[in-house]
Amino acid sequence: VSAAAPSRDEIAALVEPDRVHRRVYTDPAIFALEQQRIFERLWIFVGHESRIPKPGDFLRGRIGAAEILLVRQADGTIAGLHNRCAHRGAQLCVAAQGHVRNLVCPYHGWAFRLDGTLIGVPLPDGYGDRIDAKRADWQLARVPRLDSYRGFMFASLAAEGVSLIEHLGGITRAFDNMIDRSPEGLLEQHPYGFSQEFRGNWKLHMENATDTVHPMFVHESSVEAGRNYDGDGAEELPQAIQMFRANGLPLAEWDRVGIHAYPTGHVYMGGFYRAGTIAPQRSDPVFDAYRRQLVARQGEAKTAEILAMDRFNNLIFPNLSINPRFQVLRQVHPIAPDRTVATSHCFRLVGAPPEIARLGLRFLNTTNSPASLISSDDLEIFARIQEGLARSDSPWVDFSRGLGTERPGDADEAVRAPGTAEASMRAQYRAWLAAMTAP
Amino acid sequence: MTAGGAFDLSRAAPVDDPALARELEQFLFREAALLDEGAFEAWLALFAADGRYWVPGQPGAVDPDDSISIFDDDRALLAVRIARLRQPRSYAFEPPPRTVHVVANIESWQAPDGAHLVRSKLLMAEYRNATRRDFAATVHHRLVRDAGALRIALKRVDLIDCDGIHEFMTVAF
């Protein structure tokens, strides 16, 4: 039995300037509507083109409940196809990525070209003259819109809407910065990533990623254990230990970390690296050589600017987060109101010394492995929040911290606020409400 | 250290001394018991000073510097990991999981450098917060002698679903 979809007025009543109703996390009808109005309309990241360099290479991606294939064409372009046979609906590719000559359905042998057009149907006699390879319903369904931002592929299941570049707006600078850190201006996605399931709503992860008040509480165990680390007098702390300790910044320091939000609901934290300590503390020959490579390509001033860019956890509404400095990407995939899978990947800076790539790998391991000392505590707390919100005693979730501290941001940024303000969540819910009540 | 080369069985000789084979087996059983008892500090003491614990996050991984890892810890990081579980507000470990590590199919070799190479199969059952889950893995131990006692130079755990979807984990395999 499916309940009637909530009306736009009903949805609008769930989001107030400083609080949201618990139903946005728990109600299956709201969850279903999010699939339609957010995941099936907005631009959703589906994969990086470095995974499919050659014609015939494919990569499976997901948009909400839909599963799509990115397929490299003979002419170098990329097609976005639903991973579903036009005949009886069987999934065509089951590997996460791979290579094919054609797309052939295992069920009745229907064969499609890399662009989804029908090559032929075995035993066509039974169809009379109904088979018409030119008709769309005899071809693999195409994703209505597919676009790339410098290799990051996004798809939209809506035929109409703002362009990808409009949707991304100023947050493109985070992608640019990750790419510019490569001495060749190229990224290569590592073939494997992590998939972590948690027992909470997908939005909890997006809220948490720029919540600067939680680390000193949620991550107390790894902050304290990291502080007690005995480095045996080593010159520089291991990267993981630096990361554990960085979560232990005092509140005043967190306030110096700025929250920046765009009108489209994208958010980032500025000044985290300055305030934290996840940065090389001494000159080292590998980093110096890498820096010289960048100078050769970009010049001294631009190189200094690239390396100094201090934007942590760049959230791209609705479900993507990237960290240019460590070339790491995380995406949350809603499974049910109280179930989410977070996938995470890292990228190699093509041309950079292998030691630089290892920093990204270790950053990914330290923050996103299922055994991470950091994210395990976050995911545990998400489960506890979800448990709490499942009870109906108090309907509201408060996001009023620092209300009124929002100021107009620089250039195209809508909002700038002190780090500990819940301005990020408020900005995300403004975008959520706009998408959920759009005609 | 490339962990792939550390387990080069092609140049190793099978252990045919029953007493040695028994000693290696007992070492693995004792190690599993310490993990099940939550005696993580005693488990850590089984590692050599330069010992390493590695659980690759992708199948066929050769080098932790070039692949993603669920665990990739030297002794110092393992010590931090364990100290973190002992913190009063270690939420992911509250309540601590109960585990049973079953170690089976044990085979052992002698490497040219004198190290003992042991391959085993692991089934680990875990219970926490009304949820049971299971892990299955092929495990390689590289064991060395320190003042006569066996110590872990490298323990590599290859989960059959290393690249699968996991909820967070706190107890070592």
Image (cartoon, rainbow, N blue to C red):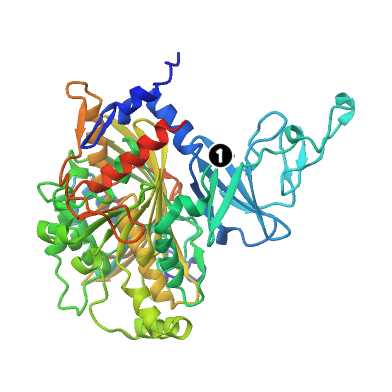
Dot 1 alpha-carbon crowd within 10 angstroms: few under 14, some 14 to 19, many 20 or more: many
Amino acid at pointer 1: Leu
Residue under the image location 39 percent in, 79 percent down: A303
Is residue A254 depicted above or below A30 in this figure?
Answer: below
Residue under the image location 81 percent in, 38 percent down: A134
Please indicate whether residue A317 sits to the left or right of residue A229 in the image. Answer: right
Residue B148 on image: x %, y %: 23, 69
Residue under the image location 42 percent in, 72 percent down: A181
Instruction: For mark 1, name the chain.
Output: A
Decide if residue B16 is in sight here. no
Decide if residue B173 is in sight here. yes
Instruction: Report the front residue among B52 and B69.
Output: B69
Residue A15 on image: x %, y %: 28, 32
Instruction: Report the front residue among B5 and A356.
Output: A356
**Could you tell me which secondary element the residue under label 1 belongs to?**
loop
Residue under the image location 61 percent in, 42 percent down: A143
